[in-house]
C-alpha cells in the first residue's frame, strides 16, 4: 500500500517506490494526494513520463496548486520541452510568486532557456525566502560557472562550504 511506497521513497529506493506508487495509484486513481506524491517522486527520480501522468491527474483535481505546477514544469524541463516548462513555471509564479520552491524551479527553467540574468534573479529571490537555501545556492553557483563567471561561483561555493560543512 501507500505506507510501503512511502517507506521505499524515504529509503531512496526510487525505482521500487515508483513501482509501488503505480500499483497504489492504479487502485485509487481519483485520490489527488496519491497522484501528487507519486508525481513529485517521479520528478525527483527523473521519470518524466510517469511524473507528467501523475501530476496531470493531480493538477486536474487541484488546478491552483503552485507546488504541482512547478513540479510539472520540472518534468517538462527534464523531458526537454522548454516552452512547456516555461509556461508551467509562469503559471506557478502567478499562483505563488513568493514561494522559494517555485522561484527555484523558475530559475532552473530560465537557466535552461538561456535567460541567465533572469535565472540569477529568481535564485536570489528564492534564497532570500527559503529557510534552507543550500540547493538553491548550489544551482546558482552551477549557473555562474556555466555562464563564465567561475571566480564568483568559487567564492559562493566557498561560502557554502563554510556555512554548511556537514550537509550533503
Image (cartoon, rainbow, N blue to C red):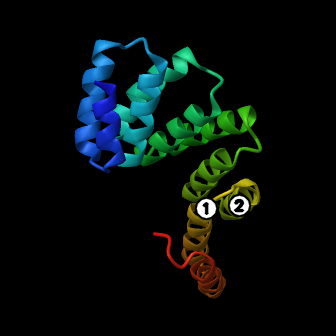
Residue occupied by mark 1? 136
Determine whether 82 is above or below 108 in the image. Answer: above
Q: Residue at x 61, y 83 (%)?
A: 162
Badge 1 element: helix
Quarter of image, res 141: bottom right
Q: Are marks 2 and 1 in contact (CB under 8 Å)?
A: yes
Badge 2 element: helix
- Location of residue 119 in the rendering, given as x and y in whole percent from the top left corner: 67, 59
For the question of whether residue 27 can be seen, the reply is yes
Q: Which quadrant holds the C terminus?
A: bottom left
Q: Which quadrant holds the N terminus?
A: top left
Q: Residue at x 29, y 45 (%)?
A: 14
Q: Residue at x 25, y 31 (%)?
A: 20
- Location of residue 3 in the rendering, given as x and y in whole percent from the top left corner: 33, 30
Determine whether 121 is above or below 163 in the image. Answer: above
- Location of residue 103 in the rendering, given as x and y in whole percent from the top left corner: 68, 49
Residue 106 vs residue 3, the one in the foreground: 3
Residue occupied by mark 2? 127
Q: Is residue 151 left or right of residue 46?
A: right
Quarter of image, res 112: bottom right
- Location of residue 135 in the rendering, given as x and y in whole percent from the top left corner: 56, 62
Amino acid at each position: 500500500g501507500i505506507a510501503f511506497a512511502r517507506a521505499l521513497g524515504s529509503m531512496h529506493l526510487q525505482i521500487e517506490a515508483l513501482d509501488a506508487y503505480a500499483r497504489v495509484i492504479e487502485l485509487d486513481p481519483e485520490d489527488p494526494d496519491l497522484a501528487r506524491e507519486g508525481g513529485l517522486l517521479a520528478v525527483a527520480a527523473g521519470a518524466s513520463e510517469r511524473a507528467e501522468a501523475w501530476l496531470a491527474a493531480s493538477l486536474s483535481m487541484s488546478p491552483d496548486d503552485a507546488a504541482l505546477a512547478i513540479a510539472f514544469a520540472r518534468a517538462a524541463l527534464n523531458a526537454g520541452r522548454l516552452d512547456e516548462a516555461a509556461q508551467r513555471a509562469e503559471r506557478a509564479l502567478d499562483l505563488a510568486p513568493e514561494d522559494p520552491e517555485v522561484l527555484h524551479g523558475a530559475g532552473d527553467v530560465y537557466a535552461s532557456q538561456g535567460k541567465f540574468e533572469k535565472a540569477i534573479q529568481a535564485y536570489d529571490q528564492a534564497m532570500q525566502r527559503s529557510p534552507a537555501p543550500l540547493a538553491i545556492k548550489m544551482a546558482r553557483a552551477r549557473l555562474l560557472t556555466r555562464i563564465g563567471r567561475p571566480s564568483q561561483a568559487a567564492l559562493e561555493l566557498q561560502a557554502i562550504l563554510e556555512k554548511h560543512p556537514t550537509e550533503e
